[in-house]
Image (cartoon, grey):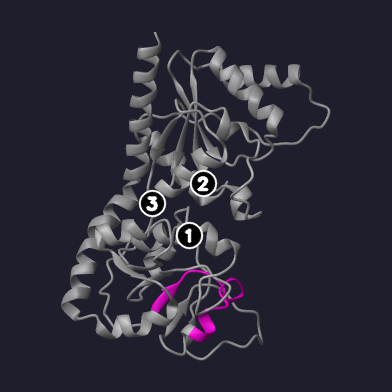
Amino acid sequence: MGKAAADAIQFVNQIGGKTLNYFVYRDDTEDADQRRIRFDGMLGGLKWDDIVIIHYPILMFDKATQRQFIAQVHNRGARVVTHIDDVKQWQINGDYDQPFDEPFLTDSDGIIAQTPKMAAQLRQQLNLADNQAMVVRGPGGYVTSLYDQKDRTLGTPIDYAGGLHKAPFLAELATQVPVNIYANVDDGAPVPEGINVKGTYDPDVIPHIIDGSFGLVWDSESYTDVTGKFAEYTRYNTPSKLSLYLSANEPVIVWSGAGVANFVRENHVGLVIDSLTDLAPRLAALTPEEYHAILSNTHRIGNVIRSGYFLKQAVFKMQGELLLAHAEFN
């Protein structure tokens, strides 16, 4: 289980949720009757109007299994809500035009999407029913067992939580702005000038370690322009890097076309730029007073991120929408 899923479970349990344990395995000989028996055991404690939240995508659930799971939840008078971590059809295939068959998205009672753009794209591309509830979560929460208040200073290097192999733009950026990277580099591999390799840390620990002035949330195959399928995906999702930096009370730098750009602007927790070529002059023009104001806002939002507030709020809102819809139906 990845950190995002583990954190989501912890946050939902804090507001009264319970974990449905499911052992992931593959058995090509298992038929629908065998799955029904297994799901009956898993869902035995469900009550009328309960909500089963799927942290999507989930391993080893093919389309037939997804439909059967949803049907058995519905048979108990409960509802299925899909909480989206990633949409692989976009992230991997880069397909934002063709409808695709994914029952946990098309047949669920509700979807918790990450951004307004993600919600709108899903509804349009999958032709979702008008009565399918859709709630926008915002940034994901981030559980960290270690937390240390850093005295961040304008003019220190910016941080990038990731490796050079996934960030070809860093080599050129570092000629203008010094960068700390939190990843390992192969022995003997060249490290571009201006890049300081900090090493790899456990996801729970890294918020305690990063000490730059800003955290960079960026995905592109080039430096000047924002290009590539992963860059396109950032128009819709909320990258885990955003939550990581904010959980450490570190301001962020994001692309103006990203799905999180409005959140950063509205909460004044960082810089929103069109291109990495804009970053050096933007940093040079930033005054200490302006940076201090950004830091103050980031501290406020950092508490919210560490508490998982946005997911908790989305779950309560979804619960309300489904209960009201059920009451109107009856």
Above or below 141: residue 178: below
**Label 1, residues with CA under 10 Å away: few <14, some 14-19, many ≥20:** some
From which residue to which does the magenta span run? 157-172
Q: Could you tell me the amino acid type at mark 2?
A: Asp
Name the one closer to the observer, 141 or 121: 121
Element under disc 2: loop
Name the one closer to the observer, 242 or 22: 242
Q: Could you tell me the amino acid type at mark 3?
A: Pro
The image position of residue 282, as x and y in percent, is: 31, 80
Residue at position x 56%, y 42% in the image: 125
- Residue 157 visible in the shown view: no
As drawn, the residue found furthest toward the top would be: 330
Mark number for residue 139? 3
Name the one closer to the observer, 203 or 113: 113
Distance from Cα at disc 3 to Cα at disc 1: 17 Å
The verdict on residue 163 being magenta is: yes
Mark number for residue 203? 1
Residue at position x 29%, y 57% in the image: 302
Residue at position x 24%, y 80% in the image: 286
Mark number for residue 85? 2
Q: Earlier in the sequence, mark 3 or mark 2?
A: 2
Name the one closer to the observer, 79 or 199: 79
Q: Earlier in the sequence, mark 3 or mark 1?
A: 3
**Label 2, residues with CA under 10 Å away: few <14, some 14-19, many ≥20:** many
Look at discs 3 and 1 and give the one toward the viewer.
Answer: 3
Q: Are marks 3 and 1 in contact (CB under 8 Å)?
A: no
